[in-house]
């Protein structure tokens, strides 16, 4: 959060909330539209700006700018849902029970497991999540039966997903066993890998994300988290330095 910008012109309310570790900018826009944000006693509207000395309330609770930058690597078990919504009993935030407000960067299917990052920095969420930034995510996939090389070749090329009416980007795919392969994606359609496999008549029985850009799952036990190392953070920030940071659309 730029202090000079804050003092002179203020910061857009959605950016202020994300920078304070309340939620991502996209989620902030929804909360503002729902009337759950107030600025100096009045209901906030999209485009409002927050200046130094302004009081902001989110669901009736005061919001203060977050000073500490939190960035965690978590090994998500199967069955945990990557949402901060409390109405989901198996939500990732309650499971981790971290002492400060954080939220996940992107999603990992409930039936999938592996690496997911969590933070209190809204801009970081936007920069990593945008598919246009081509940030790599690597997975190890196990299918219900053995596959041939034609399957791997098909997965590498663009795959048409009828349910989503999209063609996936070409990607790197490598055999790791009779029924297992690694795949590196730079996009993240809903249940993309599972849908791709189904196109060729295979069903995914296990899916583990093992890498997000330069951050690896390695031997982090399932259900546990760790802080990113200084080296990991420096490299991560270097890779996203020129990334788009505009909020994601709902499309």
Image (spheres, rainbow, N blue to C red):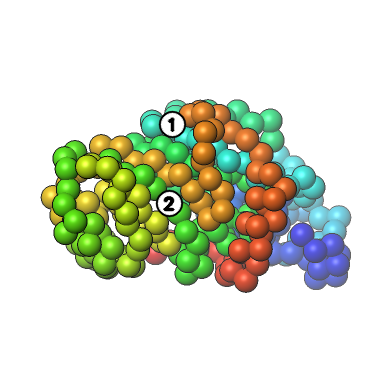
Disc on the earlier residue, 2 or 1 = 1
Left or right, 140 with reference to 115: left
Helix, strand or loop status at disc 2: strand
- Residue drawn at x 23%, y 57% is 152
Q: Quadrant of the C terminus?
A: bottom left
Which mark is on residue 77? 1
Between 126 and 75, which is closer to the camera in this rendering? 75
Between 239 and 132, which is closer to the camera in this rendering? 239
Helix, strand or loop status at disc 1: loop
Residue 28 seen anywhere in this rendered image of the structure: no
Q: Count residues near mark 2 (Cα–Cα under 10 Å), then give few for <14, some for 14-19, many for 20+.
A: many
Q: Count residues near mark 1 (Cα–Cα under 10 Å), then give few for <14, some for 14-19, many for 20+.
A: some
Nearer the observer: mark 2 or 1; the answer is 2
Left or right, 111 with reference to 35: left
Q: Is residue 43 above or below residue 77?
A: below
Residue 4 seen anywhere in this rendered image of the structure: yes
Q: Quadrant of the N terminus?
A: bottom right
Q: Residue 21, how many percent across, how many down?
A: 67, 47
Q: Residue 46, how many percent across, how many down?
A: 61, 64
Q: Residue 232, how many percent across, how many down?
A: 65, 50
Q: In the rendered image, which residue does mark 2 sit on?
A: 138
Q: Which quadrant of the view contains residue 43? A: bottom right
- Residue drawn at x 77%, y 53% is 40
Q: Would you say the residues marked 2 and 1 are in contact, meaning their CB atoms lie under 8 Å apart?
A: no
Left or right, 150 with reference to 170: left
Mark 2–mark 1 distance (CA, rounded to whole Å): 17 Å
Q: Residue 95, how many percent across, how many down?
A: 53, 28
Q: How many marks?
A: 2
Q: Is residue 76 above or below residue 125?
A: above
Between 115 and 125, which is closer to the camera in this rendering? 115
Q: Which quadrant of the view contains residue 7? A: bottom right
- Residue drawn at x 39%, y 56% is 184
């Amino acid at each position: 959060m730029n202090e000079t910008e804050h003092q002179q012109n203020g910061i857009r309310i959605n950016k202020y909330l994300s920078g304070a570790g309340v939620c991502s900018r996209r989620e902030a826009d929804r909360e503002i539209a729902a009337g759950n944000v107030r600025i100096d006693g009045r209901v906030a509207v999209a485009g409002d700006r927050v200046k130094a000395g302004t009081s902001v309330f989110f669901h009736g609770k005061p919001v203060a700018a977050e000073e500490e930058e939190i960035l965690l690597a978590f090994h998500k078990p199967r069955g945990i849902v990557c949402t901060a919504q409390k109405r989901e009993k198996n939500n990732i935030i309650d499971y981790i029970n971290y002492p400060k407000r954080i939220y996940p960067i992107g999603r990992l299917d409930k039936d999938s497991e592996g690496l997911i990052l969590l933070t209190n920095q809204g801009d970081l969420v936007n920069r990593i999540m945008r598919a246009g930034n081509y940030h790599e995510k690597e997975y190890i996939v196990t299918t219900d039966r053995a596959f041939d090389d034609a399957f791997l070749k098909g997965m590498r090329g663009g795959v048409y997903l009828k349910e989503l009416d999209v063609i996936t980007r070409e990607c790197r795919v490598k055999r790791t066993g009779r029924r297992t392969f690694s795949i590196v994606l730079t996009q993240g359609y809903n249940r993309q890998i599972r849908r791709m496999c189904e196109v060729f008549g295979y069903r995914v029985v296990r899916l583990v994300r093992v890498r997000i850009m330069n951050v690896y799952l390695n031997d982090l036990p399932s259900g546990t988290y760790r802080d990113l190392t200084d080296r990991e953070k420096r490299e991560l920030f270097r890779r996203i330095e020129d990334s788009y940071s505009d909020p994601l659309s709902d499309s």
